[in-house]
Amino acid sequence: MKARIIAALFTVIGAGLLILSLQISVPFSYDPLGPKPFPVFVSIALIILPFWIIFFAPDKKADFTIEKRSVKLILILCIYMAAFEYFGFMVSTTFTCCFIARTVGSNRMQGWLTGLLISIVFYGVFRLMLDAQLPLGKIFGID
Amino acid sequence: MFGLWSGFIAVFNTTHLIILFAGCLTGLMTGILPGIGAVNGIALMLPFVYAYSLPPESALILLAGIYYGAEYGKGVTSILQKSPVSHVHTTQMNGYALTQRGFAGKALLFSAVSSFIGSLLAVVGFITLKPFLNPIISRFGPAEYVALILFVFILVLFLFGTAFIKNLIGLCIGMTIAIVGLDSATGTLRFAFGLPELYDGIDFIIVVIGLFTLGEALLLIEQTTNTRRIEQKITIGFNHVKAIFKHCWSIIRCSLIGFIIGGLPGTGSSVAGAAAYHIEKHINRKKTDADGADEKGIVAAVSAGNAAAISAFIPLLSLGIPGSATTAVLLGAMLMMSLNPGPMFFIQQTNMIWMLLASMLVGNVMLLFMNGLFIRFFSRMIQIPHWILVPFIVVVSFVGVYVVQHTMLSIAIMLILGIVSYLLRKLDYSIVPVILGYILGEPLEVQLRRALAISGGEVGILFQGFINQLLWICALMVILFRLRQKIRVFR
């Protein structure tokens, strides 16, 4: 059933993309095809193809279970994304890594150590060695 | 031969040797770590390449080293670990059988030597074939490219996984991602949703890290308790070294099979390994005992797999056509570094190609020594707990994407792609058509529009000329072959 719901979602996305594709207007194009037909064709394919899965595909292998751990990781990643610039790389990474490690099965000490080590090593490598910009934290008044 | 000599001169400078060593080592380690592999190894290394601003030739040596290094590593994991999550392939079947009987060292030695000879012979094959490729690839125009890309799509649709419709949906998703941004010919915005960050399209690093690395992390977190590894001392004796000479002809034969199959788009090292194994099994069906059969199984699958990994560079460099997910990621990385693989690149940048071939020869020698001398150390890497691995992968993904665009939108897109990739894999979709659709979607549209502009809108141009006709016949044969198989199963 879940496979069919996801397939239906593809059809909806395809329909949305088709509406956007049909709105593409080009005042002048040097080639006979132009930029419109390709997205239109892909969108139509994305609308039609999932129908096969919705109506004809067997159900035996299609269903699956999303484990709690994966849902937890997705939530942690969303929070990490929200905290990345606000709390800065070091703080957000330490906490995120600790939570992920705990989710996967480490004890509290191992989790905090993993978080601290990864954030320090990555900050050192990217900021100090490779001179890449990493956020320091808006909350601390540093951009 | 002078070209190869100049290639060796370019490789034998301190910087390139360090980069090559780093590439081989990273490849070996990512190949050994269960669930990581070559494609994630390359994806994880891209942020470092970008941040360090490596020169294109050095980056190419590094990334290619990761690719063929991971082939060595894959063999180690297959031999030492029985894991329901790893890809079931022939090395696993035979290598693990030997490990269970207490011959892990022997199996690892066989794997390392077969990998080395397979890669070496494939590089020699590439060098031999190189002069003959120029006249063929220089005949490729826009129409030929369209036919070739469609041929690759047909191969991928019919050969990857079992579900044709799912592969086709994956291809469409990939092409949709490729459409986002400004149309290069007319400057029209497509699927950009008014967001300036999307005007240049979705960056390659974001797509690769999202689809592969983050998707893999989400799967990896579910598999923490599924692995099982046999604990035994790895010993390599002189009699093991002697025993490998028995399989000399098998290695050479399977390397040749792997070389031919690897050059075909849509195949990859696993297909080559399986094909070589079955041919070898057929040839030796009455000759070998159980031990001999397992040994032959390892050398056949590993030598063919490594030869295929090297010969996959032929269509990649000469035509700019990737045959697998890993070569698609390599192609994207090359485009990111302003290298445009294809006929012009192959004919004009001969120095770089010779340097790459020389680096492959040197890199394989390095890998043989790493496998021979430090195998006990590397084999312990399988036991790295996932509570270290998963946070590491997550942080590389976030930092990698952030250093490229410095926007939270890019991280959000990566996260969405990671979740989509996770869901697709759970639903038995292959990610290979998605990445090929993304990488080849734009060239397909651009070349099709060019071809139609040349012909004045006549579609017939796609069927004119020997190369086009040959490609369409080959495509038809693939379709008929698959249909025949389906009808047989149905009966």
Image (cartoon, grey):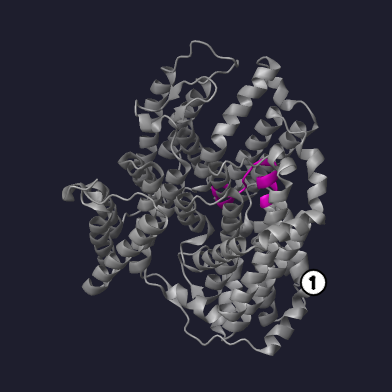
Range drawn in magenta: B313-329
**From what the image shows, is residue B42 above or below residue B336?**
below
User: Looking at the image, which is closer to me, B374 or B233?
Assistant: B374
Residue B387 lies in quadrant: bottom left
Task: Name the spot of residue B181 as percent of width and height, x first.
Answer: 44, 29
Task: Name the spot of residue A112 as percent of width and height, x first.
Answer: 24, 68
Residue identifier under label 1: B249
Left or right: where B328 falls relative to A60: right
User: Looking at the image, which is closer to me, B200 or B262?
Assistant: B200
Residue B455 lies in quadrant: top right
Left or right: where B261 falls relative to B405: right
Main SS of the magenta part reads helix
Which chain does the numbered disc 1 sit on? B
SS assignment at label 1: helix
Asked whether B328 falls inside the magenta stretch, the response is: yes
Task: Name the spot of residue B21 as percent of width and height, x first.
Answer: 58, 66
User: Looking at the image, which is closer to me, B24 or B219?
Assistant: B24
Residue in view at x 52 percent, y 11 percent: A28
Please state which amino acid type lies under the numbered disc 1: Trp
Instruction: Count the marks.
Output: 1
| Label 1: how many Cα within 10 Å (few below 14, some 14–19, many 20+) | few
Residue in view at x 75 percent, y 63 percent: B121
Residue in view at x 58 percent, y 71 percent: B93
Q: Would residue B297 be visible to someone looking at this image?
A: no
Quarter containing the N terminus of chain B: bottom right
